[in-house]
Image (cartoon, helix red, strand yellow):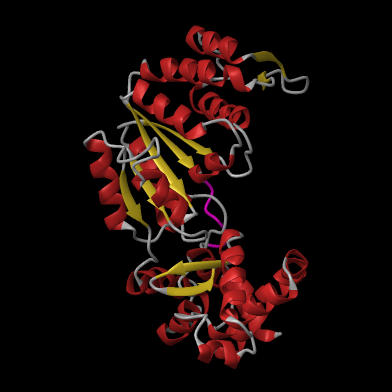
Amino acid sequence: MRKPNNPFILSGYHSPDYFCNRKEELAWLDEQFRNERNAVIYAYRRMGKTALIKHFFHHLEKNKRAKTVFVDLLGTSNMPEANKKLANAIVQQFGNPHGGIGKRMLAMLSTLGATIGLDPISGVPQISFGLVQASEVERSMEAIGSFLKDINQPVVIAIDEFQQITSYAGQNAEAVFRFWTQEFPMIRFIFSGSHRHMMQTMFNDQSRPFYNSAQMWSLEPINRTDYSTFILAFFRKENLEMTEALLDKIFDWCRMQTYYVQLICNKLYGRRQAVSDDLLLEVQQEIVQQEAPLFSTYQQLLTDFQWRVLKAIALHEKVKSPTSQEFLSSYNLGAASSVSTALQLLIKKEFIVYQNNHYRLHDTLLMRWLQQL
């Protein structure tokens, strides 16, 4: 695999050389795999859930301990769409377009309503999935499960943004997926999601189908010391000056959200010069301004009062009691009941999150942008 020009990867997973730590999390995932337990990993977005799972899968595949499948449900709105994504991921992993499609896969594809043709340019077999009706999804998933259970290695399926299925209107998607995992107990599952509260509810609420069906892990920020060592090594390798004091400023500014730390380091590394306070400020400002056109559209999604509440929390960074008289008077927000109503909507739309007894903005860059207005 070609080495990346910039070691601070922003999209996807490259290789272990460009992945920092997570030893405790990897050991936990391995324990679940060895003992045939399903696992749940949840964290807010941009904390590195996907990279962690793909790093774990890299080691399972490299050591030939399992075959792995990764499915991302983000953007799906119903069971047929989820089923199609799952089927595509299965074909990508187990299909062999250059060597022909095996009989078992052909049988599965037939059940899924897929068609096989030839790419007009390359001549390689091409698989197309037609529309699967909601009534056919369970039969389709059973065909996928039957295909996977006969694979001569353990199979692990990771379903990312799993909380998305709770938005599939009138389709009882949780029950369908739960029945599927029970019907094929030798297939291991990793469920991950970025809506912490919903993921906790799905697996801890006694009234939900997935209650007590998997072991759960809340993904926290990477250890600062380990992350510092990882980052400094790449800068020093290129004789680029970077200090631990500057890294502390980066970590604090990013609130340890992995993606934003990577983004700033990627841009600083790309400058190929000694990192100074001035350069760091320049890069931070560049990153915020790049997102400004998007952030400015958010105001149209909210009422004037909701926007004022959002900005007040951004200026405060984290708020323990947003309905306290001190907070209300500091930002001229009026009645506590109005703020409480606005908060409910901001949380629902995931502008605001509640964690460790504090309210804060979910998106660090949005917070930094609002602080500049």
Closer to us: 181 or 53: 181
Relative horizontal placement of residue 313, taking residue 225 as reference (left or right): right
Closer to us: 335 or 202: 335
Magenta-highlighted residues: 1-6
Q: Residue 273: x and y, percent? A: 58, 80
Q: Residue 84: x and y, percent? A: 60, 27
Q: Residue 83: x and y, percent? A: 57, 27
Quadrant that contains the C terminus: bottom right
**Does 352 appear above or below 146?**
below
Which quarter of the figure has residue 203?
Answer: top left
Which SS does the magenta portion mostly show? loop
Count all numbered tags in the image, as a single digit. Answer: 0
Residue at 23% over, 43% down: 31
Residue at 44% over, 57% down: 43
Q: Is residue 233 visible?
A: yes
Residue at 43% over, 82% down: 248
Magenta stretch: residue 286 in it?
no
**Does 179 appear above or below 48?**
above
Q: Residue 127: x and y, percent? A: 65, 20
Which quarter of the figure has residue 182?
Answer: top left
Residue at 33% over, 53% down: 217
